Image: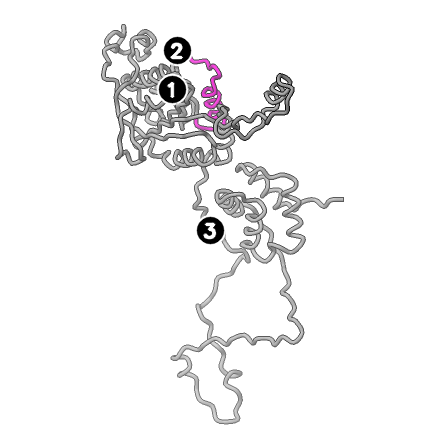
Amino acid sequence: MTEPLPAFVRELVSRLRRRGLPLGIDDCAALRAALAAGHGLSSNEALRALCVTLFAASTRDAEIITSTLHLVNMPVWAVAAPEPAVGDVPTPAPMPDLQPDIVESVPSLPKGEGDVSRTVPLPRSGGIQPPRSGRPAPPFIMRPQYPLSEREIAQAWRRLRRPRRHGPRVELNVEATMTRYAATGLVTPPVLVPRRVNAARLLLLVDRHGSMTPFHGFIDHFTRSMVRASRLDSITIRYFRNSPGTSPDRSALTQLADPANVEMDAIVDRIPPLAAGWVYDDPGLTQHRPMRKVLDDLTPGSGVVVISDAGAQRGSLVTTRIFDAIALGLAIITRQARIAWLNPLSVDRWADATAEQIARHIPMFPLDRDGMYAAVDILRGRPTVVEAPL
């Protein structure tokens, strides 16, 4: 009968699974077998190295395991020291050095009156030591822990696929080969076709600085994970401040019946697509390029994801910002591309802000696991329900 797992192993595996590591029964059995063989018992550092060896598949996984071990109540094993082999000479422990002033204060004894080491006590260094608990205090956990792990981001965005055959002809087409053989009656070379590759392309428009400053670390982690693990054909990242472009013609705003009403439903058909403005190639917003050129590079079926709080962080409601966001959505739709908006704030923070009005026209989701899956569905072509679609 299999022995139950130690309590700390269950707690460790549960925490790691919540952090996104896909651990199963085989991983638990491997850890138990390694502990039974005597590995990882000498210290907490040895146990950490063992868990990293067994469970980590990347540097990010190793950091997650290290930070999680500090949160688990680890046992302290009493491991006996190895017995010396036959013929080994035990090494005596070195004697502590006396300070010069203490050595001079030791009175000289006549010959034959005993050993100085027996009559003069050795001084203690460091004074009185405080009592110890027997376990070292864990250090501070300085590694960031974001709401989304790299594994969760990769799993969500790998669903964005546009299969297309491209490249050298290396894959056998059985149906075409048999059809040609049946038509000619001769043994002919097989029909080869290119492999299917993911031709999905994605443009990320990331809001930077201002109210998005608190989310810089999280957004950088999100974009870095997408570029590294999403397996898309191409990912282009451009940065902007507040709005990715400014509409040169806002005359439609004067046609609103009530200037205090920020809803654009009555003038949506009169808003021109965005054709002006600047975006940046770097997060520092120093290397700019025209927004028109970025939009012209979109191909039919491409996906565009805007990452911005849309004024929800400060609760601001700006009519021109709503106008420019709708113009951006129209410019993307006219190029037969698809758009989704990811907001780092939860839905309850969108109320009475610019984000609430933009979400009436453009699909907007919170930047969490469910929001990512919903955005991917939009980019794959699944219809969505918005209050006033463009």
In front: label 3 or label 2: 2
The kind of residue tagged 1 is Ala
Whether the magenta-drawn stretch holds residue 132 is answered as: no
In the current view of this chain or complex, which residue is farthest to the right?
1
Q: Which residues are magenta?
A: 367-390
Tag 2, which secondary structure? loop
Q: Could you say which is closer to the camera, residue 6 or residue 187?
A: 187
Residue found 32% across the figure and 35% down from its top: 283
Residue 22 in picture, x, y percent from top left: 58, 37
In the current view of this chain or complex, which residue is farthest to the bottom?
111
Q: In the rendered view, would you say 18 is above or below 259? A: below
The kind of residue tagged 3 is Pro
Q: Which circle marks residue 388 in the picture?
A: 2
Residue found 36% across the figure and 35% down from its top: 216
Tag 1, which secondary structure? loop
In front: label 2 or label 1: 2
Quadrant in which the N terminus appears? top right
Within 10 Å of the Cα at label 3, are there few (<14), some (14-19), or many (20+) other Cα atoms?
few
Q: CA distance from mark 2 to mark 1?
A: 17 Å
Task: Check disc 3 and report the residue beneath it.
Answer: 139
- Report the colour scheme: one colour
Residue contact between numbered discs 3 and 2, judged by CB atoms under 8 Å: no
Q: Earlier in the sequence, mark 1 or mark 3?
A: 3
Q: Which circle marks residue 351 in the picture?
A: 1
Residue 39 in picture, x, y percent from top left: 62, 55
Q: Earlier in the sequence, mark 2 or mark 1?
A: 1
Q: Could you say which is closer to the camera, residue 368 or residue 27?
A: 27
